[in-house]
Image: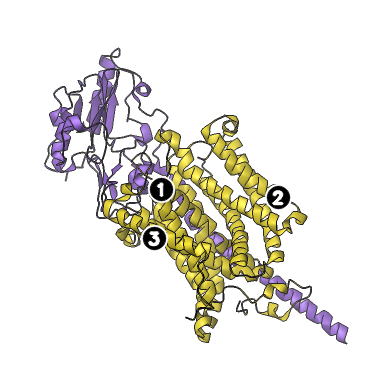
Amino acid sequence: MIAIEPKALLIDITRCIGCGECVGACLEAHDLPGTADDVKGLSDKALTALAEKDDLYIRQLCRHCIDPACASVCPVEAFRKLPNGPVVYDADRCMGCRYCMQACPFNVPKYEWFSANPRVVKCDFCVHRQAEGKVTACTEACPAEATMFGTREEMLALAHQRLAEDPDAYYPEIYGEHEVGGTSVLFLSPVPFAELGFRTDLPTGALPHLTGKALAKVPGIVTIGGAFLFGLWWLTHRREEVALYEAGLAQEKHDA
Amino acid sequence: MPEPGPYRLTFWRAFFFLTLAAGLPALVVRYTQGIGAVSNLSDEFPWGLWIGFDLLCGVGLAAGGFTVTAMVYLLNLKRFHAIVRPAVLTAFLGYALVIAALLVDLGRPWNIWHPIIMWNPRSVMFEVGWCVMLYTTVLFLELSGMLFERFGWTRAVKVQRVATLPLVILGVLLSTLHQSSLGALYLIAPHKLHPLWYSGALPWIFWTSAVAAGLAMTIVESNLSARAFKRQLELPILTDLSRILVVALGVFGVFRLTDLAYRQALGYLFEASYESAFFHLEFLAGVVLPFVLLASEKRRRNPRILYGAALLAVMGFVVNRLNVAVTGLETAAGQRYVPAFTELLISIFIVSIGFAAFGVAVKYFKVFPEEEHAAAPVPGLPPERLAPFARTT
């Protein structure tokens, strides 16, 4: 069997013309109502959207982190990172605690706030199309090749190649190469990412390590803590026994 | 059960029925139209009052259950024996209410049991879920002696007494784990939570503040039940307890400031910002002031100061948790969150049920010892000390 290579998207903001074909194709591929014109941002009815900033268009979508915070925090493993890249959600496992929304550094997961049986909603990297060997709907729809699909390795190589070949056209960084341990959606931009509203204060380490450090202490607290507490009980009660014994001796002496 | 005398509609009873009458329709809307229909929760603010107050404060204020049992059974401080049952009952009801609040806050509450079979040991929430499940059971078992006494099951009473030590140790361990883990929940969001609250030490900050809050809540609860059930206040015991509270507040205060200094975040205290205002409310009014008030033995013996200072500490704790859950996240969310009226109503509804349940428990079970506290610790060794767990109260 051939090893599964993780896939990625490369989104080149210098090429995007803001036509919204990706948004429309995404709605269609996921049987969502409305048209691309209705989409103002990510919501429970839009898995991708375009944000405009100084005539540049920035695609909003799940970044499919290599070590996703949403999957690490989910108490019931409703989120899973698949070997071929997608971070997918299983509503049947979900309790609806929304810790994923709180944990996501990109504020991607959205919620069906007005449903009696609500789901978390987010881009699924067209996991079903990928299973059929197809590229994502957004990639297929893009007339400008602003969104490209391939293995993460290929996409990173392509991005580095563009940076090297045309350094004047690009800000010399690939957003998503290292952020929060790396993501499966990579961005190239003509201007610094901070100017386009990207978070540039994210750590390069994967976020789950932050909570992992705290959880790693649990076994120690239980074993050492348990022994300590029992010792404490023994000590305080033993002291009392000794005091009683001595008091008894004193009493005997007094009586004699 | 016979009612002692004719039923009187007091102010609080009227308030209770009013909350019930208003809260039930709100709940119907919540379960038919969704969470969004009754709350101001949104994609920008997925956790609000129900998590910040009902869950974080509910669990923290119930910490008296593990601190008081630890003092009495593990440290052998017998003079606090009289407050064990009210503290454990408060804790048990606190956790029951937290679970009730979760049934409202969770989007798919019928899946609340999923962590039992669907494991993700990497998740702090998974650990909290298990600890809360287990600790609620432990609290129930700690209280079960009270039930067995009521039904006259002497054998069961004896078994329960033997089980007390392991239950208490288990309770302290589980409490330590999840009290701190509630803080660890926020470790995943360094980019969202304001530096006045985000810290790698959040788990320990949550634990120490819960210890103080649990003690303060025990004092407040004793005062409330003294008034409600026309009992004498266990003043000498509570004064002693407040000495421990002073230490807990002091340790917490120093810890909190040291942590801010270590993270070089002290500068934020002197900014004229929304966040610093809320920090000062939490810290000056809720930690420093009660610490100063309770620092002198003379003031600790004054029931009004004692009660007032404990109430301040409880409120300071509540503000701290709401600051972590709401204030500290508002800037990152790019908007303010204020709970909707129905959100608040449902919270009040849940708390009211807790108060009513406490009242019912006191009426039918022996929660308080019969004015035993009058026999304050006497010098020498009374015979009951021979058998630490032989007492039924």
Residue B293's tag is 2
Question: Residue B338, relative to residue B223: is it above or below?
Answer: above
Q: Residue A46 placed where, x, y %?
A: 22, 37
Query: Quick one: which residue is furthest to the top in this view?
Result: A168
Q: Secondary structure at mark 1?
A: helix
Which residue is depicted at the point 83% across and 84% down?
A252
Q: Chain of mark 1?
A: B
Closer-to-camera residue (B277/A256): B277
Circle nearer the viewer, 2 or 3: 3
Question: Residue A44, relative to residue B311: is it above or below?
Answer: above
What's the residue type where badge 3 is placed? Ala
Q: CA distance from mark 3 to mark 1?
A: 15 Å
Q: Chain of mark 2?
A: B
The residue labelled by disc 3 is: B21
Tag 1: Cα neighbours inside 10 Å, few (<14), some, or many (≥20)? Answer: few
Q: CA distance from mark 2 to mark 3?
A: 40 Å
